[in-house]
Amino acid sequence: MHEGNLEKIFEITACDSSSSARTGIIHTSHGPIETPAFAPVASQGTVKGLPHNIVHSLGAQLILVNSYHLFLRPSLETINKFGGIHSFISWHKPILSDSGGFQIYSLTPLAKIKKAGVTFSSHIDGTKIFLSPEDIVDIQVQLGADLMMPLDYFCPFPSTNEKIKEAVELTSDWAQRSRKHFLQHETSQLLFGISQGSTSWEFRQKSIEDLLDIGFDGYSLGGLGIGEPKSQFQEIVEKSTAILPKDRPRYLMGIGYICDILDAVDKGIDLFDCVLPTRNARNGTLFTSKGKIVIKNKKYEHDPNPIDDECSCYTCQNFSRAYLRHLYERNEITSSILNTIHNLHFYLDIFQKIRQSIQLNSFQELKCYIIRKKQKENDNAFS
């Protein structure tokens, strides 16, 4: 059933003549995703600070939920009583689910990684838990997420060749098992393969080739954006997209700096996610067309201007910097709400412009324009 629908997964709708940038449509059972696309992070089933109707109105086509967190709380049993994650959280557009591997390795004490799977202690109550790659697939199938990620293993940067090789071998073995188990399910969900290999092209290429031999609905690049030099990051993305199949979506995991996104789109990446816009909003850092604003700074105490006079979001159309500073200083919940509205609008608007520019064959002009602004303003949101 699943194999018969492969030709409907992804279609390319436009290509930029001077780069590998393309627009496309990922077809899911909860609607199409026009790419390049950005998935706001909603680990617990919510984008922090915003109800779904606002997230939708800002232009989000999909959100990312975290299997690890939802598996622990509220539990699969609770979610299944509502018919799956879409019904439970009342978000009826596409959902991308992360395997939770990163959280298992980073949040849980003394996680033990073996070929069979991962043993760890819950960061909530210390309960001992074992999850195999097959378990991770079952969890996400039960959740009902449209795009699913298998369990993978990455190593920090820098790591020795021995550690990188180990991560690639384990990831490939788990990918094989995950795909085999996934195909036993009667589902229209899509399973992506995740490549590892850090910044070593030898190991990254081996990881991608292993995934291609297995065959996946889409392909993800993992283990990047964790401190490696920008030149090495760009090299791995470029070489990876050059050997990934053109008829499958490509997902660069956890990357959120605008210049990195533009470079990756240039090289043929279709899908992104990152906590950068929402986390920074809650911390009072706002991204604008003219640079970064740290709203708690005293210079905004009496500032009557909007965050960005070129922005059409609700926050900018109605509130001054002085008011937003007041809310942040008083630790008001409304501060997180209004700041998050602005930052998500900023990101999703850029992605809309990216799609439009590719369709008009002017992506390079947009990219150069944004990068020139970055160089002028030295904005941390961009680099």
Image (tube, grey):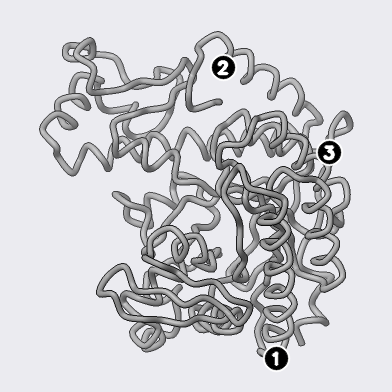
Q: Quadrant of residue 285?
A: top left
Distance from Cα at disc 2 to Cα at disc 1: 48 Å
Find disc 1 in the rendering and name its residue.
Answer: 184
Placement of 139 over or under 205, stated as above or below: below
Judge whether residue 319 can be spotted in this image: yes
- Left/right placement of residue 88 relative to residue 138 reads left
Q: Does dot 3 land on a helix, a strand or a loop?
A: loop
Q: How many marks?
A: 3
Q: CA distance from mark 1 to mark 3?
A: 35 Å
Q: Is residue 96 above or below residue 295?
A: below
Q: Is residue 123 above or below residue 312?
A: below
Measured from the top left, where is residue 67 in percent x and y? 46, 70
Label 3 sits on what residue type?
Answer: Ser
Check contact, mark 3 vs mark 2: CB within 8 A. Answer: no
What residue is at 43 percent from the left and 29 percent from the top? 312
Which numbered tag is attached to residue 155? none
Q: Quadrant of residue 349?
A: top right
Residue 52 pos. (x, y %): 38, 57
Q: Secondary structure at mark 2?
A: helix
Residue denoted by label 3:
20
